[in-house]
Structures are given as C-alpha cells and as structure tokens.
Amino acid sequence: MTIPLRLRDLKAAALAVVLCLPGAARAAGDLDALLVALQMGETAALMREEGLRHAEGLVSDYTGEPAGAGWTALVGRIYDQAAMEEVIAQDMAAALEGQDLGPMVAFFESARGQRIVTLELAARRALMAEGAEEAAILRYELAEEDGKEIAAQVQQLMADSDLVERNASGMLNANLMFLRGLASGGSYDDSEEAMIRDVWAQEEDIRLDTLGWLGGYLMLAYEPLPPGDLDAYIAFWQGTPGRALNAALFETFNGLYDLHSFLLGRGLAEFVRSEEL
C-alpha cells in the first residue's frame, strides 16, 4: 500500500514538530528501541500475510472465482509492509508523546519480554493453519471449565486491558470502513445509517467470537512460558507504562485496520465492476 501523499505529508509534518521539541532525540531513540523490542517488523509482515489471505477469500466470496493477478497486485499494494511499518512508527510516536518509554523498553528488551513477544507472534502465525483456531478455542474452554491457572491468568489479562471491548469495537469500526469503501467504489447503495445498522447487527456475534478467539490465542501464546513470566506480564499491563502502551497500540493498529478495510472495500468494488465490463 502506498500511503496517500497528503496523509503521508501530514504525518511527516506532525512528526517533524515532535522531533524539534527538547529531549526529542532521546525520545525518538527510545521509540525506535521499543518498536524493535516489540518486533514490529515481524508484526507488519504477519499482518501482510493475514491480509493477503483474507483478501484472497474475499474476492472468491464476491465473484465466485479465484483471485487473479490483478486482484493480487492490488491487495499487495494495500498491505505493503514498508508502508505499514512507517505508519506504525509515526502513529506510535504520536500516541506515546509525553510518555516515559524507559520502563516499556526495559521490560520488552529483557529476556522475559522477548520470550513473550516471540511466543505471541508464533501463536498468531500458528492460528493461520486450518483448524488451529477452533482447536485453540476448545483448549481454552476446557481449561476454563477445569479451573486451570492459565485460564484465570488469561482472563485477568483480558479484563485489565479491556481486550474484548477494544478488539470488538475495533472490528466493528473496521467493518464499517469496509462498507464505506464499497460505497466509495460504487458497490454499496444504502445510506450511512443503513451501513451503521448493518454493522451493529453483528455486534453480539463479534463480541462472542472475539472472546473465544482471544482466550484461545492468549492461552496458546502464554502456556509455554516459565513460571512467573505471565504474572510479571500481567503486572506490567496493570501499571502506568502498560496502560499507556496498551492505549497507544490500540490507537495505532485500529487506525491501520480502518485504513486497510476502507481501501480493501473500495478496491473490491472497483475490481468487481471491472470484471463485469
């Protein structure tokens, strides 16, 4: 994806103002260190892979035909990894402005922090395999029924960071942006009010799906951790640095998902119309 020039220039201008402030050089260094510790490059690569897989199924659902070279090229531009990394860095800088990044960097640069991030990414990638998501959700539900400590710890994490609500709200907003993209491309004729009704009709199902997916994903990621690591992670997110980072991550990635959803909807509408000609 190539960021629209106007948007990119605005982001660059805002970042330039931040970098002119006293202490900005140190803050920028801390931000770079934090992004590296959070393995944002690998995160962007994974998002690209997930996006390409989702888009391939999307065009098949709408046209009944497999995705062709034209659609693949379009989607590749939307999910351009370098552009995603640029947006993530700029938006995280804005969202964390004025925050003390030192405790965040210290936690995630530690051996414990790196174990956690690596396991999170590995679990997310593992869930892309056929049947893996259903199996992970089932294991979490069984652990919950059996009263296992890992299930209680996962629930604590979800509650402390409001993960179900934040993820469900983000998904609802992304779905709305997708419909707006379809409308922009001429493939959705209903009003804005109708779009909102269509999206909110999915709310209950999305929240339930989000709860199950998060439980399965988090347990898959954290079950291999050594004793004490998950308790330390829970404590980090409960503290001021963790809360600030949590808010910044959701602000950054929800914005990115909204942008991708709109571009995907508009691209799909234009692609389907071109196929019909």
Image (cartoon, rainbow, N blue to C red):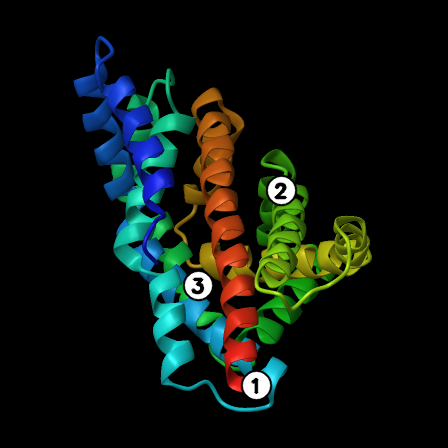
Mark 2 Cα shell of 10 Å, populated few (<14), some (14-19), many (≥20) = some
> Camera-side residue: 209 or 251?
251
Q: Residue 50: where, in percent of width, then height?
A: 44, 67
Q: Residue 266: where, in percent of width, then height?
A: 53, 63
Please state which amino acid type lies under the numbered disc 3: Ala
Q: Measure the alpha-carbon separation of dots 3 and 1.
A: 40 Å
Question: Circle 1 — which element?
Answer: helix
Please state which amino acid type lies under the numbered disc 1: Glu
User: Which residue is under mark 2?
Assistant: 166
> Camera-side residue: 56 or 134?
56
Lateral position of residue 207 relative to residue 255, left or right: right
Of circles 3 and 2, the one toward us is 2
Question: Image point 28% across, 32% down: which residue?
Answer: 12
User: Which residue is under mark 1?
Assistant: 276
User: Which residue is under mark 3?
Assistant: 123
- The quadrant of the rendering that contains the N terminus is bottom left
Mark 1 Cα shell of 10 Å, populated few (<14), some (14-19), many (≥20) = few
> Camera-side residue: 16 or 239?
16
